Image (cartoon, rainbow, N blue to C red):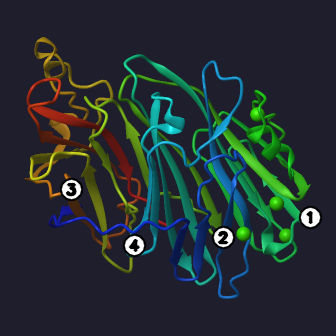
Amino acid sequence: MTLYRLFAFGLFAISLPAQILLTDGNLQFRADALDPVSHLPRTMDLRCDATTTDHGFEHGWYYRVAGDLREFSFRAIGPVTSGVTPSNDHGDRDFGNVDNRNLFEASLDFDIYDTGPASGVVISRLTVMNVTNAPLTLDLFCYTDLDIANTAGDDVVSGSGTSHFVTDITGVSIEVRALGADRSAVAAYPVIRTQLSNALFNNLSNSLPPFTGDYTGAFQWENRTLQPFEQRTFQVVMAANNTANALPRVEHFGSGNGRTFEIDTQTLLLQDNAATRLFSVRMKGALPNAEHRVVTGFQAIPGGLPVFQNFGGNGVPLLVDPFSFIGIYFGFTDAQGQAEVLFLVPPTPYLTGLEFFHQAFYVDAAAPNGFAYASAGLRTVIGRL
Ligand SMILES: [Ca+2]
Ligand SMILES: [Ca+2]
Ligand SMILES: [Ca+2]
Ligand SMILES: [Ca+2]
């Protein structure tokens, strides 16, 4: 076993900037502050080399609940918190009750990693949770406007319905890639932007590359039905001058047994042949100073292990196959009801592609089963960039 648990300690402090500004080497990503009213995408900066030329114009996520007559952007409505880690390579926004509709929660996580003096990868990861007691069906959309080398009209796009390679005469190349999207569109500004932000019902047109001009692009995941408390993750990657062949993956799956207790990470699970890297599995929304467990294994049981699930209706949804367990990690949450388990990824070649599943639990008599809350599951894959 070449993935070691190292030790556990308190979470990074979180600041509360209006915008999210991340830097790693020459790679810089900025997502503007949310708007409480406008459905327009927010401005974005994306810099990837020492000249600090900005290739980014706008970026934003949208949703449509089955039955809605339009798409909605994720705005500063309902409880929204935002933060950047002290390492400046991760920022996130938590939407505690999207548009105050009492239908779903969302978390938007940004990770950046520089892969050289003129290259790097930005991951934009949206996770949603159904907080109703009935199935909920959503469409999700992710919109990105790049202006390579800060010039808008001369960009050249190749690719497919899940990958837009955008470049221009300068040779800077940024791939915008969606994982598992169903529909896509590429068009000159502002056609797609208008469709996503207007008051009309629009699906993406599947107008695909090749394209030349002022690139804007979007991806759509259609009709994703979530069970009560189920969490699901949607990701878009912006890879600057990098092939990103072996992406690190973080994806939520399955349902916990409550709304507030969640598992997540603020780190990238990366193999780095030059250095040991840390990977953190964290939990939040527990009681303070409560006993917790994190289980980690090689296999998932997305629907939950039946013998644990049932127990006369008072069971625990166990989403990691116990026969595949690597470890069960024990501890107590901090005064904020949070905790973290750290894994050490050694600089050993060929760990890339290994897949792990995690789930968190904590003791709470108020849980529906009378003794413990369980989080949704977290699927992680070691990447190399
Ligand atoms: Ca910009
Ligand atoms: Ca350009
Ligand atoms: Ca629309
Ligand atoms: Ca553009």
Task: Give the CA separation, mark 1 to mark 3.
Answer: 49 Å
Q: Amino acid at mark 3?
A: Gln
Residue 2 in sight from this viewpoint: no
Q: Quadrant of the N terminus?
A: bottom left
Q: Amino acid at mark 4?
A: Asp
Alpha carbon separation for disc pair 3 and 2: 34 Å
Mark pair 4, 1: CA separation: 38 Å
Report crowding for label 3: few under 14, some 14 to 19, many 20 or more residues within 10 A (C-alpha): few
- The residue tagged with tag 3: helix, strand or loop? loop
Disc 2 versus disc 4: nearer the observer: 2
Instruction: Mark 4 vs mark 1: give the one in front.
Output: 1
* 322 on left or right of 36: left
**Residue position for label 3:** 336
Element assignment for label 1: loop
- Proximity of marks 3 and 2: CB atoms separated by less than 8 Å: no
In the image, residue 381 lies at what x, y percent? 39, 52
Task: State the residue position of label 1.
Answer: 153
Q: Earlier in the sequence, mark 1 or mark 3?
A: 1
Number of the label disc, if any, that sits on residue 272: 4
Q: Give the Cα distance between marks 1 and 2.
A: 18 Å
Q: Nearer the viewer, mark 1 or mark 3?
A: 3
The response on whether ligand 1 sits within 8 Å of label 4 is: no
Q: Position of residue 193 (x, y in %)?
A: 79, 46
> How busy is the neighbourhood of tag 1: few (under 14 within 10 Å), some, or many (20 plus)?
some
Q: Which of label 4 and label 3 is nearer to you? A: 3
Q: Return the residue nearer the eye: 57 or 96.
A: 96
Q: Secondary structure at mark 2?
A: strand
Q: Which residue corresponds to mark 2?
A: 46
